[in-house]
Amino acid sequence: MVVANEPIITMRDLRMRFGEKFVLNGIDLEVHPGQIIGYIGPNGAGKSTTVKIMLGLVEGYTGEVRILGARPQDGGVEYKKRIGYVPETAEMYDTLTAKEYLTFIGELYGLSEDSAERKARLLMEQFGLKDVFNVRIATFSKGMKQKVLLISSLLHNPDILFLDEPLSGLDANSVMVVKEILARLAAQGKTIFYSSHIMDVVEKISHRIILLDGGRIVADGSFEELKGQGREGSLEQVFNQLTGFDRHQEIADQFVAIVQEV
Amino acid sequence: MNEMRLLKFLDGFRGLFERFGVDYPVMRRILQIKLTMDGRRVPTIIGKARKKADRAGHKLYDGQEAEKNQFFSSLWLYLIFGALSSMFVALGDNFIFQMSLVFGILMFMVMTSLISDFSSVLLDIRDRHILFSKPVTPRTIGMAKTLHIFIYMFCLTGALGVVPFAVGLYRHGVVFALLFVAELIWMDLLIVVFTALMYLAVLKFFDGERLKDLINYVQIGLTIGLALGYQLLFRLFEFVDLQAAIQPRWWQFLVPPVWFGAPYEVLIHGDSNRVLLVLSLLALFVPVAAILVYIRVMPSLEKYLQKLADPGTRKKEGAGKAVKTISRLLCASAKEQVFFRFAWTMMGNEREFKLKVYPSLGFSLIFPLIFLFAMGEGRGFAGLPGTSKYLFIYFCALLVPSVLIMLRYSGSYKAAWVYRVLPLGEDVVPIYRGTLIAAIVRLVLPVYVLEAALFTVLFGWRILPDLIVAGLAILVYSVLCFGYLSKALPFSERFETAQQSDGLRTIPLMLLLGGMALVHYAATLLSFGVYIYAALLLAANWVLWQRGFAVKTRG
């Protein structure tokens, strides 16, 4: 149903402001299916806002946004059936059990209760959480909660995934599993928007990296392309250069000096 | 189960919901989940077990403990208030007067408890990420939330209305009773819509913090209003001429309870006075119009809810200095000062703490006054000087036990790990003493000063020594309360573990307070008795504030 050449997300001159402050200053972006997009930038660069706009959670922007052929400001909700979302604030109804929560979310996405529950159970098993399927989420560790969130974003087999720090709290083995899962989903033609502050991971898994700073896209391309523009080293270093940050040593010196004062 | 029956009942109205553009099965599912969550309260056992046992080792299976909805066990209180107001139904047949009064009471009760108890439902910001990112229309979500509130509203109204209904049926017949039921439903509609629109307005023009403040103030207003309202109502009996005919005044059109009083005259007495007809039409159509507006604007309420998550503007830093100075004056050690300031800021910022404590703050403010009025024996304020009624000032210390009980709870109770990580040593005395001093200065002292000032005006300067003695007694009382109540580090447990039985535990403390007031009274009968009592209290304070805190913590 998705033609590979057709962009699945388009943004033209997207601008958004809260009060006096512009959070997005004209974003132009086209995304084609089958890519893992590392969506990075300093805190407050506008990453979450872009994602929220695409999900229809934030209104009042100017410019053109098209996602899966729909325009979020039109108020239609059908397109959300093909989107999975792991928000940065890992909010869940945590007085529910994993089974109840996942079944509920699956049903909201239009699955039947039985198939939502069956799928949730199988996926929980794969993550090694079979025993806690009927346990309340409030008692879960951070990593367990993160796994539940990941499952809840995948139950309905979406075409686009928005993941905000999806690996947070996961142990090293689970991180490997999730990275593999993401690679396979992308290979099947799914689009993954991957926001994170952990540059090593973004560097390794992304096909394309978009760097946001001050509400603008300051770099867009594969890791090699980003490096190739006369820059060197890791994504972390590229990030520092592009966001114009070179004071880390200076700040560290001062910080330690203050620590030693006492 | 109960909720299943409720949902089955709703199924009957499926067509109506769908006509409003609501996705019924999804709405039903959201409602069901919300009701399930309401029934869950993490029981005390977990809070305790979690400290010792590793979290992973302690699993809580669904259905393992009784799921009890706190709300339903407090309904009997509303039943009593309803029964009280039913007296006005029985009174006579000046309906416009009686029923306006009854609806005034009912509307006040429902509205205030809606604001103080169900705001969390209306203002749940988790919904934003969880529900709105899913393919569900805002209208469906809005309707689910609205119904969620209505379910509680109807239970509440049912409890309030059942006695007046029975009385009305017996006294005034079937038409009256049916009209009463219909009007109650209409009243609920009006109240929910009005409250939501009010929130919308506040959120639109101010930030989320302001709205939460507003909720706090409403709670204080509720307690004071209730206590005062019933005093006034009983007084009304004495001078109200029930035969008085209604004098149409323009402002009556602005008072919703009067709208609801009018249809009784029109339908039962067959009065076709134009004013009454207009009022009746208002009662019929305003709620309907309100609900239509509400359905339209509910989605934008959701949009503004985002503001609740915003941190809001901070106070200026100047306030910190005053607190620092006070803490230096009142606290012995540096450690104590630290915990004074910590408790001070926590009490000011901790939303849930305020929500739980402010109602008793309201009571403490109003109780001494109520007793003054109730025992005024009709002579008014002029009769007060020369009596011992200023001793009612002791009632403002009713606040102390409830504050002390709540001090150990916090919404961010998990942050209590700092107590265990910091090198605080074995000596917990400064922690407790600093916190208690902060609580007294911040919450009890203002109430006491306010009452004392008022009492001085009412009774004259002569009672000043007695007021000071009462103040000393309250200080002693505070330490005694602390010693009696079970201890836990301040702000270290979650609110959900707060138990109903905490309330019962304060009863002996109230008796103690009464006892202290009686001793004071006895002292006033002796010459220089008050001064002897003062000296004793000073000594008691001296000893208690030094030794009274040497206790071991549980766990």
Image (cartoon, rainbow, N blue to C red):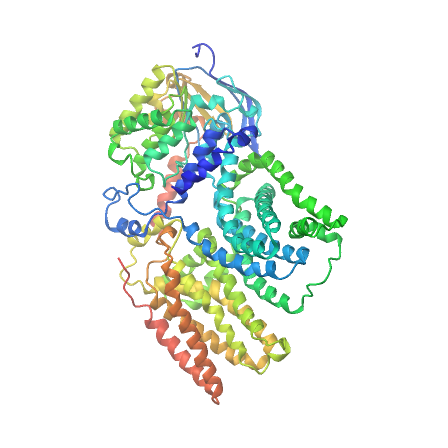
Is residue B137 toward the left or the right of residue B278 in the image? left
Q: Quadrant of the N terminus of chain B?
A: top left
Instruction: Indicate the position of residue B419 as horizontal and vertical percent values.
Output: 32, 54
**Residue A19 at least partly seen:** no
Q: Is residue B430 above or below residue B467?
A: above
Is residue A169 toward the left or the right of residue B155 in the image? left
Instruction: Indicate the position of residue B106 as horizontal and vertical percent values.
Output: 57, 54
Q: Is residue B171 above or below residue B17?
A: below
Q: Quadrant of the C terminus of chain B?
A: bottom left
Q: How many marks?
A: 0
Q: Residue furthest bottom?
A: B527
Quadrant in the rendering for residue A156? top left
**Residue B507 at least partly seen:** yes
Instruction: Indicate the position of residue A177 as horizontal and vertical percent values.
Output: 27, 25
Q: Decide which of A212, B104 is in the foreground and name it.
A: B104
Q: Residue at x 63, y 39 (%)?
A: B288
Q: Residue at x 27, y 48 (%)?
A: B50
Q: Is residue B327 above or below residue A155?
A: below
Instruction: Indicate the position of residue B473 as horizontal and vertical percent values.
Output: 44, 75
Q: Decide which of B294, B219 is in the foreground and name it.
A: B294
Q: Is residue A170 above or below residue B175?
A: above
